[in-house]
Image (cartoon, grey):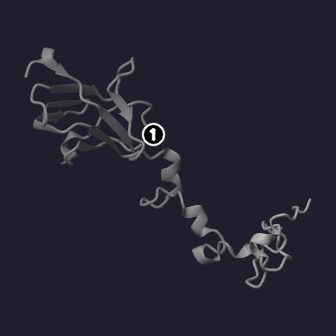
Amino acid sequence: MSTASSIPPPVSWAQRSDLIYVIIDVECKDIEHKVTEKTFTFKGVNALDASKKYEVTLNFYNSVDPEKVTSKNIGRCLEFTIPKKENGPYWPTLTTDKTKLHFLKANFAKWRDESDEEDGGDAKDNGMFSNFLNSPGGDWNNKFDDFNVDEDDDSDDCIPSLSQNEDEDEGGEGDKDKKPAA
């Protein structure tokens, strides 16, 4: 595969305190990838258009553990889980590049901030509903008890009627010459 005819695939990434997710957001075949302590290299051919060849090399901000890298081919994308060499502070960026890479973006579906990990929120909902459910009366059925709505109370009693002839007898066609109330 020649580098001149290759383009970088769309890549997204996310991080936790102990690992990095790198997602190649394209369906590929003939996949080759290599992870070293400081780099991630990927090559592949578009599964739908064999004339599109992808190649990218990312120089990591800090060291990773290449022995423990796992990958998953989800069909529409390839997901790599790359453990950091050392747990610790979040990286300010994925790569050492000084310029923004046009094909690289953050994957907020997998992203977890440092403050989220300190809270120890539920991994399933990322802590979004923990405050709601753990509050006093954290039961869904009791959340709306403060409305004080009586079942006998009819809230539309003070709404005026829309018909103008409410007090009239069943007049029918002959009552058209009556003037509407002002």
Rendered location of residue 128, percent (x, y): 53, 57
As drawn, is 106 to the left or to the right of 167? left
As drawn, is 155 to the left or to the right of 16? right
Q: Residue furthest right?
A: 182
Rendered location of residue 3, percent (x, y): 13, 18
Depicted 94 relative to depicted 146: above or below = above
- Identified at 44% across, 38% down, the residue is 90
- Identified at 38% across, 47% down, the residue is 110
Q: Is residue 61 visible?
A: no
> Badge 1 local density, few (<14 within 10 Å), some, or many (20+)?
few
- Identified at 10% across, 25% down, the residue is 51
- Quarter of the rendering containing residue 88: top left
For mark 1, give the secondary structure.
loop
- Identified at 90% across, 63% down, the residue is 181
Report the residue marked by disc 1: 89
As drawn, is 163 to the left or to the right of 182? left
Q: Residue furthest bottom?
A: 152
Point out the image quarter for the C terminus. Answer: bottom right
Depicted 133 relative to depicted 113: above or below = below
| Amino acid type, mark 1 | Pro
Q: Nearer the viewer, residue 48 or 1?
A: 48
Rendered location of residue 62, percent (x, y): 34, 31
Q: Is residue 34 visible?
A: yes
